[in-house]
Image (cartoon, helix red, strand yellow):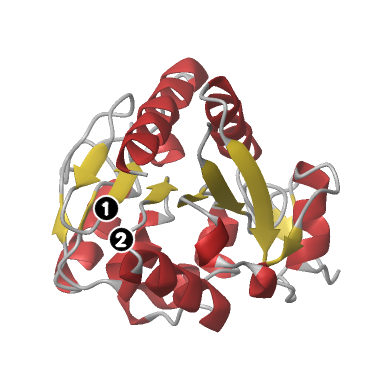
Amino acid sequence: MGKRVAVVLAGCGVFDGSEIHEASAVLVHLSRQQATVKMFAPNTDQMHVVDHLKGSPTEEKRNVLVESARLARGEIEDLGQLNVKELDAIIFPGGFGAAKNLCSWAVNGKDCSVNDQVKAVLQAFHAEKKPIGLCCISPVLAAKVFPGCEVTVGPSKMRDERYPGVPDTAEAISQLGCKHVCKHVDEAHVDEKNKIVTTCAFMCNAPLHEIHDGIGVMVQEVLKLA
């Protein structure tokens, strides 16, 4: 029998919501493993709306749950309805929405706050010893909620145009009392103690198939722990 996995979305679109390719890769790999998926998103306003053609914010207002429904083909529930007892694992795709709508990392860095529902869900899965998968920037959620945990957001803390956002993020994670583990884009890191599995995805400027493969490794490791 396939595992029951929650996938938490943060909108629709890399600059103000969930990264679409990452969300799709998570769903494809879960499907290959015959997992039963339930999708959720918080019923709250986005931090802002970004015109993805111009790359700049607009005056528009959008709702995270409504926008996430685009990715979920309408099959999505309010995150407040999630029941950890009915699920075996949870996965968070990345995208700026994870750092803008699920927490305020994009604005406040390590001093960010995490959405109350997101924090409660993470703590519930952790308390039940059920695995948590995160990719791209979303591992900062674990770093903020679980001091001392181990995550990866990229292969190196050195400055490199191939992963421009990694060094600062890795340093901030370390300042939160967590361990940043360097992993390449097609790898995942498993924190066995906390059952947290992370992969860097689009934190690296890498070919799409390598990002897809790394997310596949993350999904496989999450399901092994479930």
Q: Which residue is mark 1?
A: 195
Identify the residue at horizontal 32%, vertical 35% (top origin).
224
Q: Which mark is residue 115?
A: none
Q: Quadrant of residue 205?
A: top left
Q: Is residue 182 left or right of residue 18?
A: left
The residue lying at 17 percent from left, 49 percent from top is: 192
Q: Badges 2 and 1: C-beta atoms under 8 Å apart? A: yes
Above or below, 60 against 52 in this view is: below
Q: Amino acid at mark 2?
A: Lys
- Residue 53 appears in the rendering: no
Q: Is residue 10 left or right of residue 62?
A: left
Residue 18 pos. (x, y %): 62, 50
Does residue 208 appear to the left or right of 18 in the view shown? Answer: left
Query: Which of the two marks, 2 or 1, is nearer to us in this view?
Result: 2
Question: How many circles with numbers are drawn on the protein?
Answer: 2
Structural crowding at the residue carrying mark 1, measured as other residues with C-alpha within 10 Å and reported as few (<14), some (14–19) or many (≥20): many
The residue lying at 71 percent from left, 70 percent from top is 46
Residue placed most toward the observer, 23 or 3? 3
Q: Is residue 160 above or below residue 45?
A: above
Give the amino acid type for the residue marked by disc 1 in the picture: Lys
Mark 2 — residue? 129
Residue 173 located left or right of residue 78: left
State whether residue 200 appears in this view.
yes
Badge 2 element: loop
In percent of width and height, residue 164 lies at 34, 43
**Is 160 or 192 nearer to us in this picture?**
192
* Residue 27 percent coordinates (x, y): 61, 33
Quadrant position of the C terminus in the picture = top left
Q: Earlier in the sequence, mark 2 or mark 1?
A: 2
Give how far across and how far down residue 185 sits, in percent.
33, 29
Q: For numbered disc 1, what is the local secondary structure?
A: loop
